[in-house]
Image: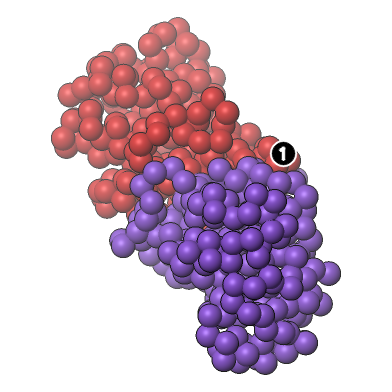
Chain colours: A red, B purple
Amino acid sequence: MSSISFIGTGNMARTIGTRAVAGGNTVEIIGRDESKAADLAHALGGGTTTGKWGAVPAGDIVIAALLYDAVVPAITQFGDALAGKVIVEISNPFNATFDGLAHSEETSIAQEVAKVAPADASVVKAFNTIFRNVLEKGRPDVFIAGDDAPAKADVAAFIKSLGLRSLDVGGLKMAHWLEGAGVVTVGLAGNGVGHWDFALGANDFSG
Amino acid sequence: MSSISFIGTGNMARTIGTRAVAGGNTVEIIGRDESKAADLAHALGGGTTTGKWGAVPAGDIVIAALLYDAVVPAITQFGDALAGKVIVEISNPFNATFDGLAHSEETSIAQEVAKVAPADASVVKAFNTIFRNVLEKGRPDVFIAGDDAPAKADVAAFIKSLGLRSLDVGGLKMAHWLEGAGVVTVGLAGNGVGHWDFALGANDFSG
């Protein structure tokens, strides 16, 4: 099992954290607001601990569970405290009309995190194509992207512990297109699918 | 049923054309090389006809079944011959390393087609996330994008006649992100999925 620290105390930390505890992982919650972190740790149970904002996280895998525009500032603030960590970046940087990304250039929050993270940290994009409500109850595919194969293997093992299938899409630059897949998912919810209880998956037709 | 013209005589015209004939649609093949068009029309059967390159297509729906860099030149060449048509654009403008798009700006071949097509033609992006081998034997979801609702309804009816589910992702600018979903699909084939017999789909978790 994995040792996981969440930076953030919001809905995604709660949802992934719930599955992480159920999957037997060691979980730590780190919030700017320590009382919110304590509340979430208590709610998650299973020995979930709290950490101090900006200090070295207990987990080997650090999940940045923050709104997209808070991610790079937080990783910058943690700085060398994240040395050697696997940083999982899960955000969707939607534009104001939810039909594109907030950054016009061909990048991603994950790639921007890699620029400010310690040199020996590894960044993996994951989970961003999955709506929270689906993650609460279903078994959607989890697409991951990153440049470091051992880091991706660690994240894949963690995802497996959640009862989910991870699917590697390639290097970290693919994080841009995973963010685009998030845009497609929201587009489907508002148009052809018409609800939020679905997720993109890789469906097999080899049979 | 629909009346369909294919511009192009390659693999995608053959694959979609086969399903189109099976679905009871009227099919026309238009090729620069008229003998190739005649060969494909003969192979498809079901009364498939051939048209003349650059002349008014017989079909109400015109599928540009060409390599991505040939699409805009062909639509430009047809010009006013495409007045009033629904133009379906299906290409994947991959870069040389298949991990991004050939155009660096946030556009799509479908949007570029809309710029050169007659003002009363409508452009719909469709089919690009589906590998040909899957389209030959499976029932993958077909994602569509376009600005004109009646045109999308026409394309959706055609897709239904193929035995497939169409899913609207939104306006034509979403074609860029559908092209990105094509990049994700190729990334999955080369990495986490490891084969080409799959397609992205919208999987329901509402149950």
Which one is nearer the viewer's eye here, A119 or A9? Answer: A119
Identity of the residue furthest to the right in this view: B1
Q: Name which quarter of the figure residue B57 lies in.
A: bottom right
- For the question of whether residue B121 can be seen, the reply is yes
* Residue at numbered disc 1: A195
State left or right for residue A16 relative to residue B137.
left
Above/below status of B156 relative to A118: below
Point 54% across, 54% down: residue: B116
Which one is nearer the viewer's eye here, B130 or B125? Answer: B125
State left or right for residue B73 relative to residue A186.
left
Number of numbered discs: 1
Q: In which quadrant of the rendered image does the N terminus of chain A lie?
A: top left
Point 57% across, 87% down: residue: B34
How far across and down, in percent of the image, does residue B118 sit? Answer: 63, 54
Above/below status of B162 relative to B129: below
Amino acid type of the residue that numbered disc 1 sits on in the rendered structure: His
